[in-house]
Image (cartoon, grey):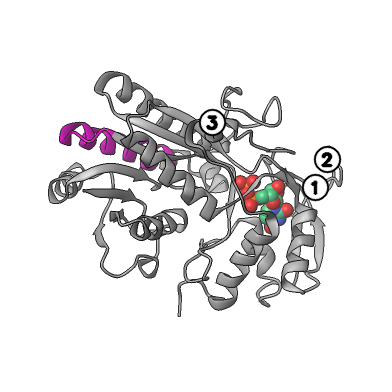
Amino acid sequence: MAILVCGGAGYIGSHNVRALLAQGETPVVLDNFLTGHRASVPAGVCVHEGDMRDPALLDAVFSAHDIDAVLHFAASSLVGESMERPLKYFQNNIGGMMTLLEAMVRHGVDRIVFSSTAAVYGEPDRVPIDEDAALQPTNPYGESKLVMERLMRWVGEVHGVRSVILRYFNVAGAWPDGSIGEDHRPETHLIPLILQVPLGKRPLITVFGDDYPTPDGTCIRDYLDVMDLVDAHLRALAYLRDGGRSVVCNLGNGTGFSVRQMVEAARRVTGHNIPMSVGPRRVGDPARLVASAARASSVLGWQAHAGIEEIIASAWKWHGAHPDGYDR
Ligand code: UDP
């Protein structure tokens, strides 16, 4: 039996593909390679290239393999871009999910693990955020993921497709040997940008606002190691195989760190003084996003293990060995 990994050449998908292989599973990758990297997919893994919105392609993929379950990571995921091109996000993300679910129903595949996001909550009304918090996305990216969640819910009710929806907080880090890692173009995430300073690629890191209502004035986020995230996906897969019912779980550490604390941690890890300047706030950034991951613990037996220095250290190992990402 194979596991179809949609978006298996992306940052999080590629780490899951590796972990599936290590567990003796047979991952099959579907990716359009617009943001994914061929070099991140191990040799020997079957790769289908194309757009998820193509029903004929999905039929071919589902016919070529005996697919047991789907891990779905493929989506446009830049918040800023989604504010400029909302329809791209609705077309690509929601359209891709509709085509995928249709193919799953046609081919009798009834298990899916989906990468959702804390962006479905928007500006939270309470912290830590549990899964019953209000769902009020503040950008089209978060809205598209919320609609994708709802599509799965109804297809579950009507067609019996069971889903584990994982709402990620801030994912970072890399495979422990530094062989695969994060390579977004453009890069917008805090940890890779901080590490560009000791790599000599930028002179300093700009903190987006220090006048938030937090202890040091900078935004607080819940940083999660990609390997802990991978562990959650493997557990979700096992849960569905054991007959588990559809569930939505947050994935986070349950502890928040400020931007300033992250820069300080990166200084300790890299031994570089990493100069910092304070710029204006970035539009749409909530002051504090911290997960309650209690449900993932009770339902999946999962909890995050890596602390921020460990996360930064593995990211540093990857970026240090691959300063230009997957480009040689
Ligand atoms: N951030 C920052 N400078 C940067 C990039 C990000 O101060 O160059 C801040 C950002 O405002 C947010 C946190 O770092 O508070 C994490 O941002 P990121 O884009 O990594 O993830 P997000 O929380 O937006 O999903």
Residue 169 position in % (x across, y down): 59, 43
Please tell me whether residue 2 is drawn above or below residue 37 in the rendered image.
above
Q: Is mark 1 within 8 Å of ligand 1?
A: yes
Q: Which residue is mark 1?
A: 218
Give the side of residue 174 with respect to residue 157, left or right: right
Residue ID at (77%, 67%)? 268
Task: Measure how far apart labels 3 and 1 are at the Cα level.
Answer: 32 Å
- Quadrant location of residue 115? top left
Which quadrant holds the C terminus? Answer: bottom left
Q: Residue at x 53, y 54 (%)?
A: 226
**Contact check, label 3 and label 1, Cβ < 8 Å:** no
Which residue is tagged 2?
Answer: 214
- Marks 1 and 2: CB-CB under 8 Å? yes
Classify mark 3 as within 8 Å of ligand 1 or not, answering yes or no. no
Using the image, determine if residue 158 lies above or below residue 239: above
Q: Earlier in the sequence, mark 3 or mark 1?
A: 1
